[in-house]
Amino acid sequence: DCDGIRIDEIVQRCNINKNLLYYYFGSKERLFNQVLEAAYQAIQQRQAAVSLAGLEPAEGMRKLIRELFRDFAEVPEFISLLNSENLHKACHLKKSERVRAMYPPMVHKINELLERGRPSGEFRSDVDAVDLYIAIFGLSYHAPANQYRLSVLFDRDFSEPAQLEHHISRIADMVLSYLRCRPFRRRLQIQW
């Protein structure tokens, strides 16, 4: 069940008939699933529209990072949906074949950039596109998802455009530094 809001509140906010809502969606859970699927599809379309034509690998990586960060900064509702879905242990995603079938366009684009940057040695050869996507996703998600808390803790306005630009630039610097460094010979073994 989708905690936090009642059907009566949804009906009131949207100025729609409760019977109509149940007719189209059947339940609050199915309504949430539809909203989640639509949000994922919108983000996927935004990411698929990112063009890397004519960009060098490092410049392309900076552009991808900027666009992924913008997805979170410009679509805060997506952050709320992700947080809700994590709180519910992905119970809605598990039921949505549509969302799970959506291959993240950014992973494909990251892989293309890695493949173009490896032969010249610009990027290291042992980086997995999915691992890198998860790292970029996490770095890009954190500040927009926690902007109010971070603003209070560090006495900075993390919603201010200059602060966002600064954050995007630092994320790109970190990722490119990682991509250019030599791989470690020995991996640290962590036991859970």
Image (tube, rainbow, N blue to C red):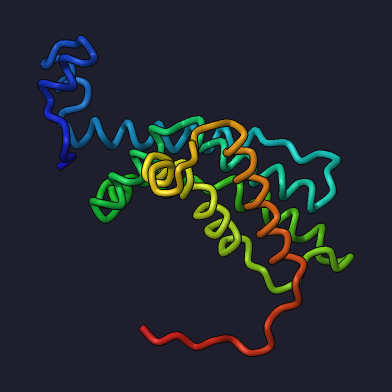
Q: Residue at x 89, y 65 (%)?
A: 120
> Residue 8: x percent and y percent?
10, 21
Q: Specify the quadrant of the image occupied by residue 81.
A: top left
x, y (%) of residue 36? 34, 37
Instruction: Residue lying at the far front in this picture: please name it.
Output: 155
Residue at 25%, 51% (x, y): give it.
Answer: 87
Q: Is residue 189 above or below residue 145?
A: below
User: Closer to the camera, 134 or 66?
Assistant: 66
Is 84 on the left or on the right of 26, as rendered?
Answer: right
Horizontal and vertical percent for residue 132?
Answer: 60, 61
Residue name at image x 74 percent, y 60 percent: 114
The quarter of the displayed image where residue 47 is located: top right
- Return the residue found at the far right: 120
Asked if residue 98 lies left or right of residue 52, the reply is: left
Count of picture labels: 0
Assign the C terminus to one quadrant of the image. bottom left
Quadrant containing the N terminus in the rendered view: top left
Q: Quadrant of residue 2?
A: top left
Question: In the figure, 159 relative to 12: above or below?
Answer: below
x, y (%) of residue 170? 65, 51
